[in-house]
Image (cartoon, grey):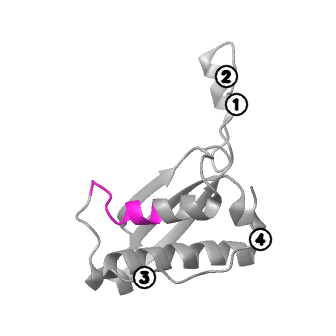
Amino acid sequence: MMLSLEEGKIAVRFARDVIDSYVSNKELKKIDFNKKFDEKSGAFVTILTYPDHDLRGCIGIPEPIYELKQAIEEAARSATRDPRFPPLSKDELGRVIVEVTILTPPKIIKVDNPKEYLSEIKIGRDG
């Protein structure tokens, strides 16, 4: 699934709103989504520190089992509690970068020889 630039901005804004409301224990603002956000898709939400860009949390839903909006919401909440790090605090909210990665459905790559994977998998295209 490809998102337009505007849809990508909505996805990131929504993930940030989920993170802010979850960490601050506030009600999540309603967002009007277009139909693309009703399609099933996997999604990851990554939280980085600002300005250092250190990883602070990254969790996702790899399979297209939820509507995109639900996958982003679940991933965003979970990224605040990435078990590799302490839970994200309210004090950190103004000092983080939020990224959203939308996943295409996984595909099986069939090869006769494992060395063929090197020519079948492209960095930047394949997960």
Tell me residue 45's x, y (percent).
49, 62
Location of residue 14 (image quadrant): bottom right
Tell me residue 42's x, y (percent).
60, 51
Return the residue nearer the eye: 105 or 127.
105
Whether residues under marks 3 and 2 lie with C-beta atoms below 8 angstroms apart, the answer is no
Q: Give the secondary structure at mark 2.
A: helix
> In the rendered image, which residue does mark 2 sit on?
116
Mark 3 or 4 closer to N-term? Answer: 4
Which numbered disc covers residue 27? 3
Q: Give the secondary structure at mark 3.
A: loop
Mark-to-mark CA distance, 3 and 4: 28 Å
Task: Evaluate whether residue 24 shows in this view.
Answer: yes
Return the residue nearer the eye: 33 or 46.
33
Whether residues under marks 1 and 2 lie with C-beta atoms below 8 angstroms apart, the answer is yes
Mark 3 vs mark 2: in front? 3
- Residues shaded magenta: 75-84
Mark-to-mark CA distance, 3 and 2: 50 Å
Mark 1 or 3 closer to N-term? Answer: 3
Mark 3 or 2 closer to N-term? Answer: 3
Badge 4 local density, few (<14 within 10 Å), some, or many (20+)? few
Tell me residue 94's x, y (percent).
37, 87
Residue type beneath disc 1: Ser
Magenta-colored stretch includes residue 77: yes
Q: Is residue 100 above or below residue 120?
A: below
Residue type beneath disc 4: Ser
Residue at 69% across, 18% down: 111
Residue type beneath disc 3: Glu
Mark 4 or 2 closer to N-term? Answer: 4
> In the rendered image, which residue does mark 1 sit on?
119
Q: Give the secondary structure at mark 4.
A: loop
Badge 2 local density, few (<14 within 10 Å), some, or many (20+)? few
Mark-to-mark CA distance, 4 and 2: 34 Å
